[in-house]
Image (cartoon, rainbow, N blue to C red):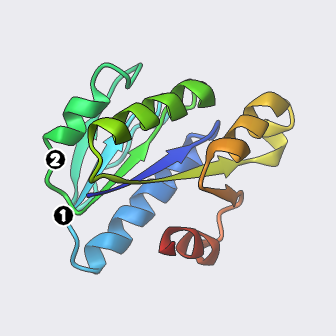
Amino acid sequence: MRLIVLAGLVSVEKTELAVMLAQYFVRRGQTVTLIDNVSRTPMPPVEAVQQVRIEDDPAPVLLSTLENLTSDVVIFAASETVPPDVLFLLLDDVQQQLPALAVQTLALIDTRTCDCFPQFRVSLESYADGVINLPVEWASVLEEIAG
């Protein structure tokens, strides 16, 4: 199973990108689950996609949620309220518990917002596998998820 994690302070853009990614993988014949942990903007229903909502802190339930999924691709839109250090430690723990899980993290960076919280931006850029600067350019997203 492949887990794509969307992290960052933005919520609307994260939700939109999660939906776009889900639709992209469905069009390619893969089964997809969206894990919605975004605090400010709930995910809209997405056709042919299983959706799971995690309220508040994902730490107590993320591992068990992933263990119970059979999708080819899982897109986890992480809450903007979870500090990057906490999120990436959680993801490391999940990957140790599920070694077959291929985890890829994308940091969504809105420079206007992140410049107000430079430590948050530095953490995101340091830990994430890829950085998506806003506004989102689909070509750069495809490049990041390609590998």
- The residue closer to the viewer here, 109 or 13, is 109
Residue at the location (64% across, 43% down)? 127
Residue at the location (39% across, 45% down)? 76
Q: Is residue 104 toward the left or the right of residue 62 in the image?
A: right
Could you give the CA–CA distance between mark 1 and mark 2, rounded to whole angstroms? 15 Å
Question: Is 5 rendered above or below residue 133?
Answer: above
Is residue 117 at all visible to an observer of this figure? no
Q: Nearer the viewer, mark 1 or mark 2?
A: 2
| Element on which disc 2 rests | loop
Name the image quarter holding the N terminus: bottom left
Q: Position of residue 144 (x, y in %)?
A: 57, 68
Is residue 111 at all visible to an observer of this figure? yes
Q: Residues within 10 Å of mark 1 (few under 14, many from 20)?
A: some
Q: Position of residue 98 (x, y in %)?
A: 27, 43
Residue at the location (74% across, 47% down)? 110
Label number found at residue 69: 2
Question: Is 137 rendered above or below residue 60?
Answer: below
| Element on which disc 1 rests | loop
Q: Residues within 10 Å of mark 2 (few under 14, many from 20)?
A: some
Q: How many marks?
A: 2
Q: Are the residues flagged by discs 1 and 2 in contact, CB closer than 8 Å?
A: no
Callout 1, which amino acid?
A: Ala
- The residue closer to the viewer here, 119 or 48, is 119
The first of marks 1 and 2 along the sequence is 1
Question: Is 60 rendered above or below residue 97?
Answer: above
**In which quarter of the view is residue 72 placed?**
bottom left
Kindly identify which residue carries mark 1.
48
Residue at the location (35% across, 23% down)? 55
Callout 2, which amino acid?
A: Leu
